[in-house]
Amino acid sequence: MSDQHSAPPPRAAVPASRHGVDPAFTALPLAALADAALGAATAAGADFADFRFERLLTSTLSIRDTAVQSATDGQSTGFAVRVIVDGVWGFAASVVPTPDAAAATARRAVQVARALARVVDERVERADEPVHADQEWVSAYHVDPFAVAGADKIALLLDRSERLLAADGVAHTEVGLFQVKENKYYADTAGTRTTQQRVRLEPTLVATAIDSATGAFETMSSLTPPVGRGYEYLTDGTWDFDGEIAVMGEQLMEKVKAPSVEPGRYDLVIDPTNLWLTIHESIGHATEYDRAIGYEAAYAGTSFATPDKLGSLVYGSPGMHVTGDRTVPHGLATIGFDDDGVAGQSWDLIRGGLLVGYQLDRTFAHRLGLPRSNGCAFADSSGHIPIQRMANVSLQPDPAGGSTADLISGVDDGIYVVGNKSWSIDMQRYNFQFTGQRFYRIRGGRLAGQVRDVAYQATTTDFWGSMDGIGGPSTYLLGGAFNCGKGQPGQVAAVSHGCPSARFRGVNILNATQEAQ
């Protein structure tokens, strides 16, 4: 994000200090509960069993204009037992943290498996995984946000809201902070035992402007991505909040008064603050193996990127390199071990524009004929069974690529897209439409003011095939979301997507206002 119209570029991250797992979590009788559950499952006839204890701390703070709207804290704890009996899964959960309850829950899981065996034809087979005994993993952060006084958080957010509200034309502001600390203890009958702690937070900032002459109003959200960091993210300059607040009002008023876009085909330069969502919808979900073989068909759909096309599907241009990654620092989907007991990894999904991989748990890895899972089993609470969930899926920058301004300079007539907003994509992740926070006309390789009502429309392969310029590492940014939904019953997971700025040729542009009429 190198031009004057983007948010100020994130500064170099300071390496995170090492934290241990919260003593309040490790003080729980985790090993005793696991021993009771696994022992009872084995005694009841389970061929395999795993035990997962989870604690989830959440805190939400919301401010409108100059007043606190809400401040809520939450905590949930519980455990789950999963078993395989004669090739069939059984699952049960409880919130009673006693060995007797753990043993009873395990026996109930075995009963569930035996009941299901009468109606389930498919038998579970899983890829191998090395044993990870007594492993501990903590995400990278400096300051535990749950250790910061609520009054200090309110003071910081109120200050930012008031400064933004003071900008010419800004009528209302909404400022918020959502923070999560997630603890998991996992043990299985193979000998793996892991203890993990993840901290993540999502700051939000929204401004609303009203044009007094026309009555038109418009909103604009901060480009700040949610991250797997601590409270230091709000104060240490990793993201330049002050710089963004200083220009946001002016950008918003320009947006209110900007002309509406003329539909047609344009060359696009897309900022990483927008492109991450397109990656999420058109690549992230499309390369989930369970979706690709129809396991999500009844709810979320399938994928055009089916296994018969592995190694042959031309997903995009030759410079396209997309990875799945459970290890990238500060990623929302970064973990030490997944809920199958598989260590976090990084792998290729698309290389040289070709589909070369999927996101997998142990069951689906075996189904695809692979010797090992890439660690994508995840449950969002102790009350849910693990399902295959998305890793940090990221478009890699061109090592020799230039700046966003360099990409813009190669466009004679086009549009520069900044920030994500609404989106739509079909059930096969193929036909899509995306909007954004801001749009700038490009004329003769230079930005020529904002336009409104832009929506870009394409098929997945046509869009990624039209990419002829990929920014360098200086344009790379890790975006993401807290609320990726999947499954029945529904589960929510946080996931990041890194990408550089990129240029696309001849993309169809709709006027969103005209299309809505």
Image (tube, rainbow, N blue to C red):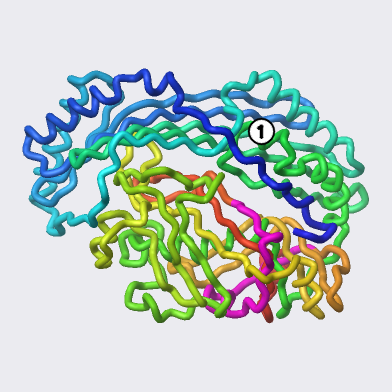
Residue 463 belongs to the span the image colors magenta:
yes
In the picture, residue 312 is in which quadrant? bottom left
Residue at x-position 29% and y-position 42%: 132
Nearer-the-camera pick, 272 or 330: 330
Q: Is residue 91 shown left or right of residue 175?
A: left
Q: Which residue: 36% across, 52% down?
A: 375
The residue at the point 85 percent across, 76 percent down is: 443
- Viewer-nearest residue: 186 or 292: 186
Image coordinates for residue 43, horizontal then vertical, percent: 7, 32
Residue at position x 40%, y 40% in the image? 380
The N terminus lies in quadrant: bottom right
Q: Pick the residue in front: 194 or 430.
A: 194
Q: Secondary structure at mark 1?
A: helix
Q: Is residue 400 left or right of residue 39?
A: right
Q: How many numbered badges does the structure rendering display? A: 1
Question: What's under tag 1, amino acid-wise?
Answer: Glu
x then y, percent, for residue 224: 69, 46
Where is residue 109 shown, x and y percent of the image?
17, 36
Label 1 packing within 10 angstroms: few (<14), some (14-19), many (20+): some
Residue 142 is situated, as x and y percent measured from the top left of the image, at 60, 32
The reply to whether residue 7 is visible in this rendering is: yes
Tell whether position 63 is magenta.
Answer: no
Q: Is residue 298 visible?
A: no
Task: Quarter of the image for the C terminus: give it.
Answer: bottom right
345 over 266 or under it: above or below = above
Residue 451: image quadrant is bottom right
Q: Which residues are magenta?
A: 452-479
Circle 1 residue? 232
Q: For residue 274, which quarter of the picture?
A: bottom right
Against 243, is 402 above or below? Answer: below
